Image (cartoon, rainbow, N blue to C red):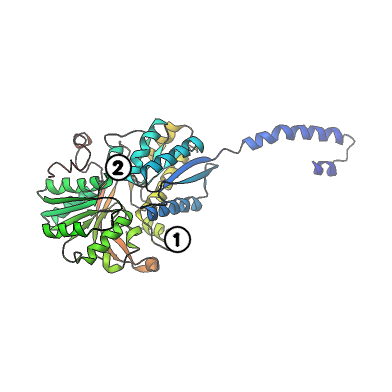
Amino acid sequence: MRRVFVFLRHHRTAAYVSVCAAVLALTAPSARGAEQPPIRIGVLASESGTAAAAGHDMVTAWKLYWAEHGERVDGRRIESTFYDTGSNPARALTVARQAVEQDHVQMIVGPYLANEGLAVAPYAIQHKIPFLEPTVSADDLTQRKANPYVIRVAGWTSSQPTHPAGDWAYDKGYRTVVTIADAYAFGYENVGGFNQTFTARGGKVLKQIWAPLGNTDYSPYLSQIEAAKPDAVFVEMVGADAVHFLQQWHAFGLKDKIPLIANETTTDQSNIRTLPADVVDGIVSFGHFAEGRDAAATQEFDTNFAAKTGKLPSYMAAAFFTAAQWIDSAMLKVHGNVEDTDAFLAAVRSVRLADSAFGPMKLDTYNNPVENVYVRRVETVSGPLAKYGKTWNVVVKAYPNVSQFWNLAPQEYLKQPVYSPTFQGVKAP
């Protein structure tokens, strides 16, 4: 108002000023009201506990995407709040409740582990909160228990990459295997997918070993494996368990004695970056992400993540970066109106990624991606990214457009129970 007094010299200045003041008083609240509230997103990640390395990568990649894209959608600010699940299902549910009931988030992204996702999903469904899962891969969440509020943006099911693995193993000439995995849903489903396709071709599973999460001594199990004399071993491990297993597999002299077929997480970058090259070099694994994939979308993501962190990205980093890309695309379709939950979820389901750090992705009618699965081999990092890591997963072969139902019709596939210790495929022992 001081400027008004300085520049107005007419004898009606006082009256004019009063009018201006009245107009400003009316318009100021309106102008402030034009600033839309932020879009509140709760990000659940395991920043402590067994899977802490994965959780740190998840959070870093999520922040990286929004930093690169302005942290706004259609004029609305993105407000991300991060919650540490501690790699624990009970804690994951506790922080999900906090996010929804105290912090009033409009969607939940995460968490990491399958058992965490199984704990949070019923709560999200009950409260009709979009539950967007880049890494939670528990099969039944998009199979027998599929729900409109649970969508695997940039995600996968546990058995999706291992169905091709069983088929591939038989084609390689392996006829007998021993499997070893973590004793929880993710392990049962990874191994189940492998066993079903391997035994359907005529292969035989000699022995199945389930190790408790957090195990540090695999020597009794390795002795059992050696005694069984299989043609190959299929392994699933996560986090620190994977590191301990790979170290001991090498130390026992089994790396050069028995072919090892690993699931995605066993040789994930978050694990192999901590190990000497000779411990992991040459190991074959199956996954929907390969940081050594020679494609522009993957290499650009690798480069940006490495420049930010000084290390190569894990699959979890790629998942949260791509999830942010996916969610951003969906929010743009509804002009940032996430309050209309049904319209927002429809927009999420309609997203198609022609390419991403993973490759092309789209959702099936059960809210799970149809995507590439890669046969990967651990090799020495080459090219400009060599300064950021010793080894990485390169693509040996790609299986395009892999469904969570493999080569069966969904109705036929869903007649069988979810993979568990008691059901390991049609012909499993």
Do we see residue 382 in this rendering? yes
Q: Tell me where residue 221 sits by quadrant.
A: bottom left
> Which percent across, then down, holds residue 258?
16, 62
The mark found on residue 249 in the picture is none
Q: Neighbour class for label 1 at 10 Å: few (<14), some, many (≥20)? A: few
Do we see residue 106 in this rendering? no
Quote the CA–CA distance across marks 2 and 1: 29 Å
Q: Is residue 296 above or below residue 135?
A: below
Compare residues 359 and 194 and report the one nearer the observer. 194
User: Relative to residue 237, is residue 202 drawn left or right?
Assistant: left
Residue beneath disc 1: 309
Q: Is residue 1 above or below residue 376?
A: above
> Which percent across, then down, holds residue 313?
38, 58
* Residue drawn 17% across the image and 50% down it: 208
Q: Tell me where residue 303 sits by quadrant.
A: bottom left
* Residue drawn 52% across the image and 44% down it: 79
> Which percent across, then down, holds residue 426?
14, 41
Q: Neighbour class for label 2 at 10 Å: few (<14), some, many (≥20)? A: many
Q: Amino acid at mark 2?
A: Ala
Q: In what element is the residue under mark 2?
A: loop
The mark found on residue 138 in the picture is 2
N-terminal of the pair, mark 2 or mark 1, is: 2
* Residue drawn 37% across the image and 50% down it: 319
Compare residues 336 and 43 and report the one nearer the observer. 43
Q: Is residue 255 above or below residue 421?
A: below
User: Relative to residue 212, is residue 86 drawn left or right?
Assistant: right
Quarter of the image with the C terminus in it? top left
Quarter of the image with the N terminus in it? top right
Q: Tally the marks.
A: 2
User: Relative to residue 18, is residue 303 drawn left or right?
Assistant: left
